[in-house]
Image: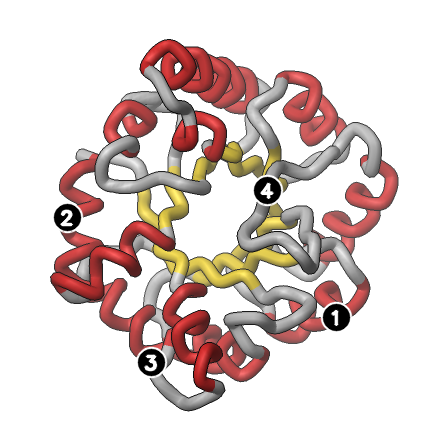
Amino acid sequence: MARLSVNVDHIATIRQARRTKEPDPVTAASLAEIGGADAITIHLREDRRHIQDRDAIILRKTIKTKLNLEMAATQEMLKIALELKPDMVTLVPEKRQELTTEGGLDVRTHKDHLKKFLGTLKEAGIRVNLFIDPEPEQIKASHKIDTNGIEIHTGKYCDAKDEIMKDKELERIYNTALLASKLGMAVHAGHGLDYYNVKKVTEIKEIEEFAVGFSIIARSVFVGIERAVREMKELMK
């Protein structure tokens, strides 16, 4: 069974809407772990629109599973990651005006910068994943710069309007996962996954871990975080 990493960013989104102290993503992470989360994911953005530095520091000290820090490949974030020492860093593209991450890294174009950047993280004992679109060229480029693994952007599959498009995107994800696995990289996947579309993706045995955030947090409004996580885990079996 694949692992589930629960992203708690949107608990912080609610808190930041009022600039208050609650709800606390640290508490949410603890409840997610009780519900069966195998890891906790947070995205520390340049504009700090949701997760704050304080959250990252406390989570590093309190979570019982593993901490995955999503971040852009900037010098500010590199300094933070080297001080925080998360279990893993997932490098993602970031635009200030976007609502959520819109696509994967262009590893082919930025391979020199990314190779040096992830090399520094790996030297510090931090595993590194690259968030990429399901394209063979990006997989090959990621392998050449010696990343530990990749996270496949599943957004186009999740947003597909009909079964033909869903099947096409699912095949792209499968082929990407297969190639990455053959090249010896860890294979993760995420973005847009929910209680309705996750099942088919979990049938791809090469994918070791799924990152799910918004749908779990949205469901937790009605059933609580522990139950929302347990229900997602059950779908992944």
Q: Residue 15 location, x and y as percent? A: 41, 79
Amino acid type indicated by mark 1: Lys
| Disc nearest the viewer among 3 and 1 | 3
Which residue, given by chain and number where applicable, does mark 1 sit on? Answer: 79
Residue 32 appears at what percent x and percent y? Answer: 26, 64
Q: Amino acid at mark 3?
A: Pro
Q: Foreground residue, 128 or 47? A: 47
- Location of residue 169 in the rendering, given as x and y in whole percent from the top left corner: 45, 18
- Which comes sooner in the sequence, label 4 or label 2? 4
> Which residue is the site of mark 2?
231
Mark 4, other Cα within 10 Å: few <14 / some 14–19 / many ≥20: some
Q: Residue furthest front?
A: 161
Left or right: 197 with respect to 100? left
For the residues labelled 3 and 4, say whether their Cβ atoms are less than 8 Å apart: no
Q: Residues within 10 Å of mark 2 (few under 14, many from 20)?
A: some
Q: Which residue is mark 4?
A: 102
* Residue bearing mark 3: 23
Which of pointers 3 and 2 indicates the residue nearer the eye? 3
Q: Is residue 135 above or below residue 187?
A: above
C-alpha distance separating marks 3 and 1: 28 Å
Q: Residue at x 23, y 70 (%)?
A: 31
Badge 3 element: loop
Name the element at disc 4: loop
**Residue drawn at x 21%, y 55% as measured from the top left:** 229
Q: Quadrant of the N terminus?
A: top left
Which three-letter amino acid code belongs to the residue tagged 4? Glu
